[in-house]
């Protein structure tokens, strides 16, 4: 008889025991992760529904001696239906983020991990207040998670009249933390979030009462993503089985057209020629060998259309430039958005921007800001493909001499960002993604090169203008003495002559760097 004991764990219990995998590895990291998860949920609940976000974060001491804090995050979003709140906050792997479209989160796990960490450290339930748009009521739950059954435990549930027409969600948790070490990371996260979401009002109230505020600088919103179907080249055997189980017993040709993106009549005919299975055969009658072959052939077939880009929500050049100008305050910024590409059937778009001068300090290599699905990546920069690409660029080709006041911003958005690890802080070296990042950075760098070349030329003209102008005083005085013509008139004529010879606008005076709102040209303050 074996002495080995076996047991099963629910997802809730497994994540409670392994909370460091989700980023809750220490009190300081847990505070940062809590703010991050709740702010990202708030932004998804607003911008994806055409609402300009207003997000309030308040962190307060509950017991300073024991390092117990409350963290409160409120948004003005769509709100959560009353009956859904217990499961949204009290059941692991219950989420709206399992559809095929761009989301800030991947697993729909963040809010639940906040609840698990709070009840593990202080035993306090999460307090959730919400109201959907147009609702007559505001409802509040106090919830914890039964980790043995992976079910919500409702401690209280109240409903009051919505007198002021408020809509949105407010979440308050009480947890063990360490603000001394979390402060800089939380602030940096919000600064970088404000740069990528200049259409949001974000306010942070710290335990000391200090307020960090980022005001909205544009009312433009990115186009929200739409829900899509899986691309056939991204399918594995288990996904294929799952899709077949959800469908009625329909012919294979109809199954392919109805359940996958970009599969039309002609495409499916060409594909089925490579498979050797009758188009009329019903999917539930496929043998195991036929299923394996079908999944393999779907991944190998090169005739599928490219994945659609409307599943994605890139920031856009004007919005990205606005955020960079507001936060980094550079002299100029150059932005580019690449056309959609794909890897393994997953669509993605790369956006890149280069900020130059202004308040940026000269550094020995470019300051890098990395984003994935509008989420700032603060850790593991050395493991990120974006860092590798930036370091490989020969910046001297673009007239950049280090130390230089230059920052590079790169945003990768996808239905499935290829993260390098479970920590979701670095993007993996996927060849297709690496290529698009490189091309995007080079496009922005070429715009910078044109700008710097123009500045060099204008500086040369300024120097020549200054030197020649020194002689106009002496020459005009001599000519006035000889010709008995007014010295001021001669001086003016000589200065106009100098400007014409240098190709300057006589009315404009000495040359100056012009600003423009065209993103193919520099955007300047």
Image (cartoon, grey):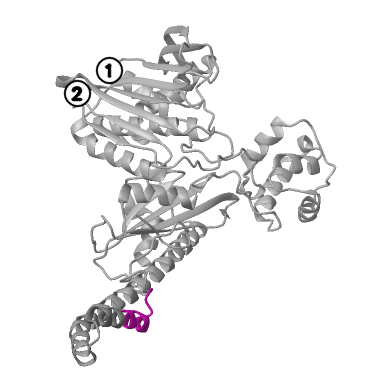
Above or below residue 154? Residue 375 is below
Compared to 250, does 400 lie above or below? below
Question: Residue at (35%, 81%) from the top-left corner?
Answer: 502
Check disc 1 and report the residue beneath it: 122
- Rendered position, 119 above or below 361: above
Q: Which mark is in front, 2 or 1?
A: 2
The quadrant holding residue 90 is top left
Q: Secondary structure at mark 2?
A: loop
Residues at marks 2 and 1, CA–CA distance in whole angstroms: 10 Å
Q: Which residue is mark 2?
A: 67
- How many marks the image carries: the answer is 2
**Magenta-colored span:** 496-505
Furthest-left residue in this view: 65
The answer to whether the residue labelled 2 contacts the one labelled 1, judged by CB atoms less than 8 Å apart, is no
Q: Secondary structure at mark 1?
A: loop
Q: Quadrant of residue 4?
A: top left
């Amino acid at each position: 008889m074996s002495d080995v004991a076996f047991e099963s764990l629910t997802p809730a219990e497994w994540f409670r025991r392994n909370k460091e995998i989700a980023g809750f590895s220490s009190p300081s990291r847990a505070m940062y992760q809590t703010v991050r998860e709740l702010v990202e949920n708030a932004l998804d609940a607003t911008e994806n529904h055409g609402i300009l976000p207003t997000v309030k974060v308040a962190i307060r001491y509950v017991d300073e001696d024991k390092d117990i804090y409350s963290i409160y995050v409120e948004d003005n979003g769509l709100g959560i239906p009353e009956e859904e709140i217990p499961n949204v906050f009290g059941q692991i792997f219950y989420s709206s983020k399992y559809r095929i479209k761009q989301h800030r989160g991947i697993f729909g796990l963040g809010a639940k991990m906040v609840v698990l960490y709070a009840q593990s450290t202080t035993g306090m339930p999460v307090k959730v207040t919400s109201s959907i748009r147009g609702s007559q009521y505001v409802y509040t739950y106090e919830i914890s998670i039964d980790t043995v059954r992976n079910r919500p435990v409702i401690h209280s549930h109240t409903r009051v009249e919505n007198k002021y027409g408020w809509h949105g969600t407010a979440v308050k948790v009480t947890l063990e933390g360490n603000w001394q070490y979390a402060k800089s990371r939380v602030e940096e996260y919000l600064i970088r979030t404000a740069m990528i979401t200049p259409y949001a009002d974000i306010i942070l109230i710290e335990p000391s009462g200090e307020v960090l505020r980022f005001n909205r600088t544009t009312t433009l919103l990115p186009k929200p993503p739409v829900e899509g179907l899986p691309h056939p080249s991204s399918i594995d055997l288990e996904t294929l089985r799952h899709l077949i189980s959800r469908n009625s017993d329909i012919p294979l040709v109809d199954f392919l057209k109805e359940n996958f993106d970009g599969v039309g009549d002609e495409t499916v005919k060409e594909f089925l020629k490579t498979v050797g299975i009758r188009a009329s055969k019903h999917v539930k009658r496929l043998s195991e060998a036929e299923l394996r072959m079908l999944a393999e052939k779907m991944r190998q077939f090169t005739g599928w259309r490219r994945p659609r880009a409307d599943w994605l929500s890139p920031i856009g050049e004007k919005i990205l430039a606005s955020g960079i100008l507001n936060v980094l305050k550079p002299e100029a910024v150059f932005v580019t958005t690449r056309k959609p590409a794909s890897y393994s059937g997953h669509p993605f778009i790369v956006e890149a921007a280069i900020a130059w001068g202004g308040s940026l300090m000269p550094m020995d290599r470019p300051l890098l800001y990395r984003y994935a699905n509008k989420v700032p990546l603060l850790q593991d920069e050395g493991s990120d493909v974006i860092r590798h690409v930036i370091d490989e660029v020969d910046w001297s080709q673009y007239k950049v001499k280090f130390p230089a006041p230059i920052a590079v911003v790169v945003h990768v958005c996808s239905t499935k960002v290829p993260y390098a690890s479970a920590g979701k802080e670095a993007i993996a070296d996927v060849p297709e993604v690496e290529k698009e990042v490189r091309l995007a950075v080079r496009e922005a760098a070429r715009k910078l090169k044109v700008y710097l070349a123009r500045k060099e030329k204008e500086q040369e003209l300024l120097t020549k203008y200054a030197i020649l102008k020194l002689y106009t005083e002496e020459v005009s005085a001599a000519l006035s003495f000889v010709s008995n013509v007014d010295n001021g008139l001669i001086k003016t004529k000589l200065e106009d002559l100098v400007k014409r010879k240098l190709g300057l606008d006589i009315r404009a005076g000495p040359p100056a760097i012009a600003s423009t709102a065209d993103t193919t040209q520099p955007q300047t303050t």
